[in-house]
Image (tube, helix red, strand yellow):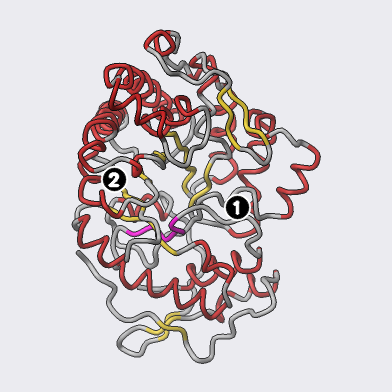
């Protein structure tokens, strides 16, 4: 594994903003410097055109001057501009299924922070209606599946997903995002993993104990495998559809797979993730695929077996340890605790530098270990991006 050439630190002459992130501080980026081991101070370089986004170069293991950075859930929740839009359009389904709104929300953080990844504003459950599974997202309650799937007959009613027919707005939004962002950042799509999607539709929504999906797994495994296969086929096509319409990388969220023991992960999640990756790589061999599973410390060695290009670690795993357990061949994303963004500017800076140092200077995407928490100060998000972009390997 490559490592950063030196401990990262800031010049004592650096004046980090303490009272928010003004346009003046953004434009005065040359004041932001990082020491290298030889004592050299590297200034922020002038913008140069690149053939492909920094994020894609990093994933491929190319030499980059700093880690690319974006944040999970960076579109929405914590931003005042998003909250204002929610007052006008209170339905999440409307916000995520209207092309103009999807584009506007996806670009909100891009216009303010200029992250290296611009992720589509959507939801992992967006494909469900196109699979004959009605759902809604209720404010204060989250996802609600109106008719949870519990039997073989229920699973038989699930249709495979045709994204061209069911979610044309996703393709249209991605194409617009790609046109707007050009190659200044990578446009990111995402899908839910089969086991996580199955958990929602069997449980009827979010769950604390996952008793219903585990009941199915251990008492009716054939029924669950049939459902998982339908989600696998459908998500494979959905990833390809997103790539064909502008997504330059796609993240797979298997948020609930870590509710499984390792042996059950190997039966009910791993084979289906591998199927998806294998299918996508046949038609889109150069499309980077990122896998995120929160609380994955017990499964780290198994995650690269899926064949993905990047494993995203949550903050409960030490980045240096995670790197060692993953191996040097795979890229890593993460993994600053989202709660750090409630700390002081100095504390945020320290945690960023520590994470980057432990991740090394190759194949690392700087990110949080989970999504931004509601109530996170926007000026601290701005500071996160400023610090990240000022780092030099």
Quarter of the image with the N terminus is bottom left
> Badge 2 is on which residue?
309
Q: In which quarter of the image is residue 37?
A: bottom left
In this picture, which residue range is highlighted in magenta?
364-369
- Residue at 25% x, 61% y is 323
Q: How crowded is mark 2: few (under 14 residues within 10 Å), some or many (20 or more)?
A: many
Q: Can residue 288 be seen in this view?
A: no
Residue 266 falls inside the magenta stretch: no
Closer-to-camera residue (8/351): 351
Q: In this view, does 300 lie above or below 97?
A: below
- Farthest right residue in view: 88
Query: Horizontal and vertical percent for residue 161?
Result: 45, 17
Q: In which quarter of the image is residue 134?
A: top right
- Residue at 64% x, 71% y is 27
Query: Horizontal and vertical percent for residue 243?
Result: 42, 32
Q: Which mark is residue 110?
A: 1
Q: Quadrant of residue 143?
A: top right
Q: In this view, does 80 lie to the left or right of 241?
A: right
Q: Can residue 131 be seen in this view?
A: yes
How many numbered callouts?
Answer: 2
Q: Is residue 68 left or right of residue 379?
A: left
Q: Earlier in the sequence, mark 1 or mark 2?
A: 1
Closer-to-camera residue (342/323): 342
Name the dominant secondary structure of the magenta segment.
Answer: strand
Q: Residues within 10 Å of mark 1 (few under 14, many from 20)?
A: some
User: Could you say whether the residue bearing mark 1 is in a helix, strand or loop?
Assistant: helix
Q: Is residue 155 above or below residue 372?
A: above
Query: Horizontal and vertical percent for residue 361?
Result: 30, 67
Q: Do the residues labelled 1 and 2 touch (CB within 8 Å)?
A: no
Query: Horizontal and vertical percent for residue 226?
Result: 31, 17
């Amino acid at each position: 594994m490559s490592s950063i050439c030196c401990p990262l630190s800031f010049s004592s002459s650096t004046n980090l903003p303490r009272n928010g992130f003004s346009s003046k501080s953004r434009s005065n980026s040359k004041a932001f410097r990082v020491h290298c081991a030889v004592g050299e101070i590297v200034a922020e370089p002038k913008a140069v055109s690149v053939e492909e986004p920094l994020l894609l170069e990093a994933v491929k293991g190319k030499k980059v001057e700093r880690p690319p950075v974006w944040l999970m859930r960076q579109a929405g929740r914590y931003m005042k501009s998003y909250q204002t839009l929610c007052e006008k359009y209170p339905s999440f389904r409307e916000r995520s299924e209207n092309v103009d709104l999807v584009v506007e929300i996806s670009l909100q953080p891009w216009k303010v922070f200029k992250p290296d990844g611009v992720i589509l504003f959507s939801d992992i459950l967006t494909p469900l209606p196109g699979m004959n599974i009605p759902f809604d997202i209720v404010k204060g309650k989250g996802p609600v599946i109106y008719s949870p799937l519990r039997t073989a007959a229920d699973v038989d009613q699930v249709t495979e997903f045709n994204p061209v027919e069911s979610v044309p707005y996703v393709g249209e939004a991605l194409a617009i995002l790609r046109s707007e962002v050009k190659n200044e950042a990578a446009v990111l799509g995402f899908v839910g993993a089969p086991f996580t999607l199955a958990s929602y539709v069997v449980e009827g929504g979010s769950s604390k104990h996952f008793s219903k999906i585990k009941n199915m797994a251990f008492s009716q495994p054939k029924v669950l495998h049939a459902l998982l296969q339908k989600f696998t086929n459908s998500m494979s096509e959905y990833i390809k559809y997103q790539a064909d319409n502008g997504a330059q990388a796609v993240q797979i969220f298997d948020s609930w797979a870590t509710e499984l023991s390792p042996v059950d992960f190997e039966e009910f999640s791993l084979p289906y993730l591998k199927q998806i990756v294998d299918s996508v790589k046949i038609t889109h061999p150069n499309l980077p695929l990122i896998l995120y599973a929160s609380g994955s410390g017990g499964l780290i060695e198994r995650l690269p077996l899926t064949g993905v290009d990047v494993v995203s670690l949550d903050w409960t795993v030490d980045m240096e340890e995670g790197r060692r357990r993953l191996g040097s061949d795979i890229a890593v994303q993460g993994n600053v605790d989202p709660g750090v963004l409630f700390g002081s500017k100095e504390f945020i800076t320290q945690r960023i530098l520590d994470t980057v140092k432990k991740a090394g200077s190759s194949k690392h995407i700087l990110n949080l270990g989970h999504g931004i928490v509601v109530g996170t100060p926007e000026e601290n998000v701005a500071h996160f991006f400023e610090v990240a972009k000022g780092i030099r390997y």
